[in-house]
Amino acid sequence: MISVRNEVLSDIDAREALLDAAMGEARFRKTSARLREGRLAAHGLSFVAENADGEMLGTVRLWDITAGPGRPALLLGPLAVDPARHSRGTGSLLMKAAIARAQELGHGSILLVGDAPYYERFGFSEERTQRLRLPGPYEANRFLALELQPHALAGAAGLIKATGVRVPEPAFAEAALRAAA
């Protein structure tokens, strides 16, 4: 049985290993990665899927952004599933959990860059991203959105920007101790 739960700090190493296995180094070169860089994921919107033994099978996070000036939104990604476990519904479970929680928390929309045939089943489409742009290269047909609240993206236009909380920088003394170790 597969369950989905909130990510916790002790999941980080397993999450990074899973992302490396599923996506490799290319994940760091994506435009969406630039928006996530140096930021914390949106509060309460990081999830892992695991089996009954507690083994991590998949992960997804959502990030705070603006969909044009003054229009809060979320950016989903990356969604990753252990390559040995593809096509078993893990990604779908993670997507449904992430969308449901974002809606419960009152968010208006979710944007992502991904495979349209996969994400359309969750309600994502290109329709509301036509007047939006990302700060770097991307394929327009893979830039998708889902409105969680009616008309949340009506009239949305402009550059997508990261708005999430920045990762706290360690104090100089902490950094020096780590460097010396």
Image: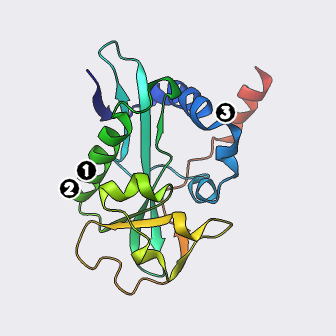
- Residue assigned mark 1: 101
Instruction: Return the residue at label 2.
Output: 104
Percent x, y for residue 105? 24, 57
Residue nearer the viewer, 120 or 102: 120
Residue 99 drawn at (x, y percent): 29, 53
User: What is the three-letter code of the residue carrying label 3?
Assistant: Glu
119, above or below 3, in the image? below
The Cα–Cα distance between marks 1 and 3, rounded to whole angstroms, is 35 Å
Circles 3 and 2, Cβ within 8 Å, touching? The answer is: no
Residue with the most extreme top position: 53
Q: In which quarter of the image is residue 152?
A: bottom left
Q: What's the image's color scheme? A: rainbow
Q: Which residue is drawn at 33% across and 19% down?
A: 51
Residue that numbered label 3 is attached to: 174
Q: Do the residues labelled 1 and 2 touch (CB within 8 Å)?
A: yes
Question: Residue type at mark 2?
Answer: Glu
- Marks 1 and 3, the one that precedes in the sequence: 1
Residue 3 lies left or right of residue 168; in this view the side is left
Q: Image check: 46 left or right of 101?
A: right
Circle 3 residues within 10 Å: few <14, some 14–19, many ≥20: few
